Amino acid sequence: MSPDVDLTVPKPGPHVLRDRLLDLDCRLFEFAAGQHWPAAEPVLPRLSRSANHGVLWFATAAAMAASRTPRARRAAARGLASLSLASLAINTFGKRSVRRPRPVLDPVPLVRQLKRQPITTSFPSGHSASAAAFAAGVALESPSWGAVVAPVAFSVAMSRVYTGVHFPSDVLAGATLGVGAAFAVRALVPTRAQSLPPARPRADVPALPDGEGLVVVVNTASGTADRARALQDALPAAEVVECEPADVPAELEKAATRARVLGVCGGDGTANAAVGMALRHGLPLAVLPGGTLNHFAHDLGVEGVRDLSRAVRDGEGVRVDVGRFTCGDRQGIFLNTCSLGVYPELVRERERWSSRIGGWPAGVLAALRVSRTDQHPLEAGFRGEARPLWLLFAGNGTYHRMGLTPGRRRDLADGRLDVRVVHGGRRPALRLLAAAVAGPLTRSPAHAAVQVGRLHLSGVAPGTLLAYDGEVTEVAGEVTLEKLPLALTVYRPLSGS
C-alpha cells in the first residue's frame, strides 16, 4: 500500500472507456509477469535500482563529458537539464494528479521483485520519465550519442513493468512526459544544429577524397596529437606538420607554397595566423579545432575530425567575412572579436600570472585586479566632449546573446561589425555586470550597441592594448576597424549533407 493513496476517498463511478483501458492495462501487466525471461533476471532489477534518484544518468553524463568533445558535453548537459525538468514535473503535479495504487505483486516472480518497494503512487512512472527525458535530450543534441543511450533508457523503462512496480500505462505516460520535457528544454535553449549560421554563400572548393593536396599545420601546444592522428587516418594522403607555437607562422608559410588547400589545427589564435596566410596566397582554408577556444571552427559547424574530413572529401565550403584592424603601418585580422579597454588589460594580467599559478587562478586574479582599478583605459569624443569608456568590443558579425561577451553568430557573412561599448564611471565590475544584464538593449545607461561596416578611432593613447582572437598588441593614434566581406573561403559541412 502506498501512503500517497488515500483509501478513504470514494472511487470514481463507472466509465466504459476508462474501465476498458484499465482492464487492458492490468491484463498486459499480468501477461508480462507471466513471461519467462531468464536473460533479463540478473540485469533488469539491478538496472532499475541503478536509476534511482537519477544516479545512472548522472554517471552516464559524466562518462560522456569525459570524452572531451564539445558535442558530447553539450549532449550530457542537455540530457541532465531535460531530466531535471521531467523530475520537477513528476514530483510537483504528476504523482499528485492521479493517485493510482501500485500493482499487486502476486503474479510477479519473487526473483524479479525489488528488495525495496517504492511507496509513491504509480502513475506516471518517474523512472521512465527520467530515462526518456535524458535519452531524448541527448539525442536532440547528438543523434550518435542518443543511439547509444536510447537502449539503456528503454531497458530502464521496461524494467519498471518487469519488476512489477508499474503498469504499462504508467511507463508510457512517464516516457511521454520525459520526451516532452526534452523538447521544452530545446525550445528554451536551441541545440547547436538550430543555432548554426546558414551555410551560405557556398564556395567552389576542391573535393579531396583522400586528402591529397591538403597540408595541415598542427600546433602541438594545444594538445592536438590525437586529433592529428585521427585526421591522418581519415585523410591518408593529407600532409600533417606538427610544430611548436613559435614555429607555426614559419610552417604555415612553407605549407602555403606547396598546398592546394591550407589546413590548421589549433585554437582561435592559431586559426587567425592561418587565415592571414590563406588570404595572402589565395588558398581555401580547412580549420580543425584543437585549442582552448575554438569559436570560429564551432560557428562553422566543425567540431572534430569527422566534420572536417567530410567537408574536405565532398568539397563543401562557404565564403565568410573577415575583420581587419589598421593602426599606422600595422594591420591585423580577426575572425571573432576585437576589443580595447578592460578585456585586453585582463588578458595581459592573466598571461603575466598564468606561468606562475596556472591558467584558471591567473584568470580570477586578473579579473580581480582589473575590476578594482580606478583608471579608465579609453576615452571617446562626442560633440567636443571627452567621455570615459571601460570597454569597446567589435565582433566579426552580429552576435546574439545577452551581454557583451561573444555568443552565437547567426551569419558569418553579414558584412557588419557588432560594436558595443561600456560607458565609464566608478567600479568597472558593476558597470560590466549592468551592461551584461542590459545586453538585449541597443542603448542603456550602462552600454550602447550598433552594427556598422567600418569604425574609425582617433586619439588612442600610446600603449593602449588591443585584443584580437586571444592575441594582444599595442596601438596608438588612429585605429580603424573594418570588414572584408566574403574574403575567406573555408571548408564546412553543408546543411542536409
Image (tube, rainbow, N blue to C red):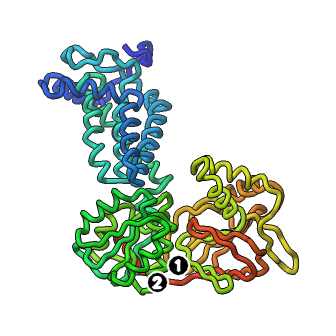
SS under mark 2: helix
Give the image location of residue 309, x and y in percent. Answer: 30, 68
Residue located beneath label 2 in the image: 279
- Residue at mark 1 to residue at mark 2: CA–CA distance: 10 Å
Left/right placement of residue 430 relative to residue 236 reads: right
The residue lying toward the viewer, choosing from 185 and 418, is 418
Picture disc at residue 473? none
Residue 1 found in image quarter: top left
Quadrant holding the C terminus: bottom left
Residue 19 found in image quarter: top left
The residue lying toward the viewer, choosing from 206 and 81, is 206
The residue lying toward the viewer, choosing from 320 and 21, is 320
Of the numbered discs 1 and 2, the one sitting upstream in the chain is 2
Query: Are discs 1 and 2 less than 8 Å apart at CB?
Result: yes
Residue 373 found in image quarter: bottom right
Left/right placement of residue 38 relative to residue 172 reads: left
Picture disc at residue 322? 1
> Which residue is rendered at x = 31% and y = 48% of the image?
146
Please say whether residue 278 is visible from this viewpoint: yes
Mark 2 Cα-neighbour bin, 10 Å: few <14, some 14–19, many ≥20: some
Amino acid at dot 1: Val
Give the image location of residue 171, x and y in percent. Answer: 31, 33
Amino acid at dot 2: Leu
Give the image location of residue 238, x and y in percent. Answer: 27, 72
> Which residue is rendered at x = 65% and y = 86% of the image?
329
